[in-house]
Image (cartoon, rainbow, N blue to C red):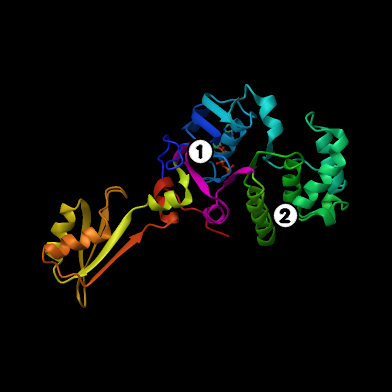
Amino acid sequence: MAAAGTGVSGNGTSRLTIETNGLSKRFGHQLAVDGIDLAVPQGSVFGFLGPNGSGKTTTIRMLLGLAAASAGTVNVLGLEMPQRLDEVLPRVGALVEGPAFYPFLSGAANLHRLDAASRHAAPATRKARVKSALERVGLAHAAGKRVHAYSLGMKQRLGIANALLSPRELLVLDEPTNGLDPQGTREVRSLVRSLAADGATVFVSSHLLAEVEQICTHAAIMSVGRLVAQGTLSELRQAGQARIRLLTPDAGTAFDVLVQLGMTPVAGTPAPAGDVVTAVAAGPKEAAAPEEIVARLVEAGVRVRGFSVERESLEDRFVALTGEGFDVAQ
Ligand SMILES: Nc1ncnc2c1ncn2[C@@H]1O[C@H](COP(=O)(O)OP(=O)(O)OP(=O)(O)O)[C@@H](O)[C@H]1O
């Protein structure tokens, strides 16, 4: 995992669809976004994860040129924002705070109106583009139905269809499953996954860890305006602390060996075959390989009757990073 500010490790040469440097937003005395360096690789489904109020929407608004940054730079599709807004926006589809639909117009009629309001959209191809966007989000059957008869999940999919009216290289979706029932949530999640399969980079914010784990390849974690971690999901998982658990009748010697290996042992709860000693390393890079730990213990005469390594779960890691519990609802 890359710490905030160091880009995406292991993938440093890949092209970045979104890149920010020192991006900040101040509201009065409050620093809502505090110098974040986002690195969103091309083709990723990038989860922008953080508790409510951590600065996700404010960041997204700056990425799209909807709000001015107080400091820092934003590059989207390799172009500086907001200076290159006119070139960038036609290549980006966004669902932020949901578009306003007319309830007594059909889904198709609403998309026609929204497309007509965009000066980048070609009128000649509008009908075909509306049809294909509705098909893409699974609403072809409801195209002629008035929006007031749509479920929340259908309205959200219509919002995504609006973002898909033209071919897009980047889709930015702000909490697309917020407020949806389980069925609507499932529909929108599977839609998001399939959008990436079409080749777009998808940047999706969420306060739900389980959601990000289900649909994303990469994630960044926000906590009170700061970016506290980012990387691929497996990098984020691996960056968690490893805890070893040792069962031995020679707890005292084991304790000394573990300290020599740079670990922090917690001594012995008595167990039938000896004592259980647990220990953590300061970080993943500092941890010796399990086989090395066992070899050193045996060398020192420690009788190893049980040994296991447990990694922190992604949830433990997020709680450790943000100091808050994540809503793990499905
Ligand atoms: N226009 C504004 N004026 C003043 N403060 C604002 C404004 N917009 C956002 N904030 C504050 O900035 C902080 C970050 O808000 P933001 O909406 O970006 O968070 P978020 O992570 O998207 O949370 P949520 O999921 O609840 O929308 C919050 O404390 C919020 O109250």
The answer to whether the residue bearing label 1 lies less than 8 angstroms from the nearest atom of ligand 1 is no
Q: Which residues are magenta?
A: 200-228
First in sequence: mark 1 vs mark 2? 1
Q: Amino acid at mark 2?
A: Gly
Q: Quadrant of ligand 1?
A: top right
Look at the picture and state if 126 lies above or below 241.
above
Badge 2 crowding class, 10 Å Cα cut-off, few under 14, some 14 to 19, many 20 or more, is many
Measured as percent of width and height from the top left, residue 281 is found at 27, 52
Which corner quadrant of the image does residue 87 belong to?
Answer: top right
| In magenta stretch: residue 220 | yes
The residue drawn where x is 84% and y is 34% is 116
Please, what is the three-letter code of the amino acid marked with disc 1? Ser
Q: Which residue is mark 1?
A: 14
Residue picked out by circle 2: 153
Name the quarter where the C terminus is drawn.
Answer: bottom right
Tag 2, which secondary structure?
helix
184 lies above or below 125: below
Q: Nearer the observer, disc 1 or disc 2? A: 1
Left or right: 140 as drawn, with respect to 164 = right
Quarter of the picture holding the N terminus: top left
- Give me the residue at 79% from left, 49% from top: 134
Would you identify the image quadrant in which residue 265 lies?
bottom left
Q: Position of residue 176 (x, y in %)?
A: 65, 48
Picture coordinates of residue 123, whole percent (x, y): 86, 34
Q: Secondary structure at mark 1?
A: loop
Q: CA distance from mark 1 to mark 2?
A: 35 Å
Q: Quick one: 52 or 219, which is closer to the camera?
A: 219
Residue 248 position in % (x across, y down) = 18, 70
Q: Residue at x 38, y 49 (%)?
A: 239
Q: Nearer the viewer, residue 144 or 225?
A: 144
